[in-house]
Structures are given as C-alpha cells and as structure tokens.
Amino acid sequence: MPRAVFVIPHHAYRAEELERPREALAAAGVEVLVASSSLGPASDMSGARGCEPDLLYSAVDPSDLDALVFVGGTGSAEYFDDRTAHGLAQAALSQGKLVAAICFAPSILANAGLLEGRRATCAPARRAHLAAHGVELVDAAEVRDGALLTGRGPEDSEAFARALLEALA
C-alpha cells in the first residue's frame, strides 16, 4: 500500500489543502499520515481546532513513504527556513519520492533548493519569492516537473489531489 505523509504547519494551515487530498488518497487505498511540529491539535486558518498530527515532522523517514506533501496556509512560513523540513524534502526527492507542496508551501521547496530551474506554481502572494529562486512560474492549478508537484491554492485542492493520485499511480 502506498504511503503519503502530509506536513502541516501547527497553526494556520489551509484545511481544504489537507482534507481534500487526504480524503482522495485514502479513498484510493493510500495510507495517509499527518506530521507537524507538535503532536497537539493543530489549528486551521480560521483558528479552529483542526487535525491532530500522527507524528512529528522531524520523525518522518523518507524511505518509509511514497509521497511527501507540504500543506499551505500562512502558517507554512513555520518551515520556510527550517533546515529539518528542507532536509526531509531533499532526502525524499533524492530517493525518487514524490515531493509536493501547495499554496504558500512551495516556498519551503524553493528555500530547500529544489525548485531552481524547475516549473512550479504557488499562491499569488508567493510568486515573487519563487521567481527570486529561479523558478519557472506557471499559472495553473497544479504543475508537475518530474517528482515535484506544486499546487496554486485552496481553490485547486481537488485538482492537486487528482495530480497526487496520478503521480502515485
């Protein structure tokens, strides 16, 4: 059974960017785990109590997963300069795993050095940041470039979920 790990910010994650893809993957038989910087209940962008993570993101082993997905929301800035998150993404990609990010979260991948010279999309508020990191920006719901998949934002969560499923197939 394929396994996907979604990394969410502990505060201010986009619920639909977690829930829609998580539900689609689970329905297709993918084991889905949620990781964060704390094991207590996370809060979504509205401030409401949200998901309870299954494990700490620092405990994720890239060799035990098929896809690593960074969920967006303004809280994803928690990982923008986080060396552990960068190392996790770098290790997963070097092992040929699918590495994905949506909304604000592609900035994590850009700061990890994974998007330079690659095609990607992100939330409009993060486009200048990605461009400064040498990313070829594409205005689309989702963009796949090899083992990297990026999504634009919450309104594209279903398209992002379909692209995740297709990439894992």
Image: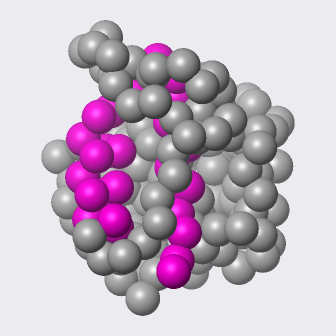
Which residue appears at 63% of the width and 50% of the height? 109
How was the colour assigned to the protein in this rendering? one colour
Q: Is residue 25 above or below residue 135?
A: below
Front-lying residue, 99 or 122: 99
- Measuring from the top left, give residue 156's x and y in whole percent: 21, 54
Check the image and name the residue furthest to the bottom: 169
64 lies left or right of 48: right
Magenta part of the protein: which range?
1-26
How many badges with numbers are in the image?
0
Q: Is residue 120 magenta?
A: no
**Which residue is painted at 24% across and 52% down in the image?**
20
Can residue 100 be seen?
A: no
The x and y percentages for residue 15 are: 29, 34
Residue 105 image position (x, y, % from top left):
50, 41
Observer able to see residue 95 = yes
- 28 vs 84: above or below: below
Is 160 on the left or on the right of 35, as rendered?
A: left
> Residue 127 sits in which quadrant?
top left
Name the quadrant containing residue 24.
bottom left
10 sits left or right of 49 in the view? right
* Residue 16 is covered by the magenta coloring: yes
Q: Residue furthest top?
A: 47
Q: Nearer the viewer, residue 12 or 80?
A: 12
Residue found 24% across the figure and 41% down from its top: 16
Q: Residue at x 77, y 43 (%)?
A: 59
Residue 33 % position (x, y): 52, 52
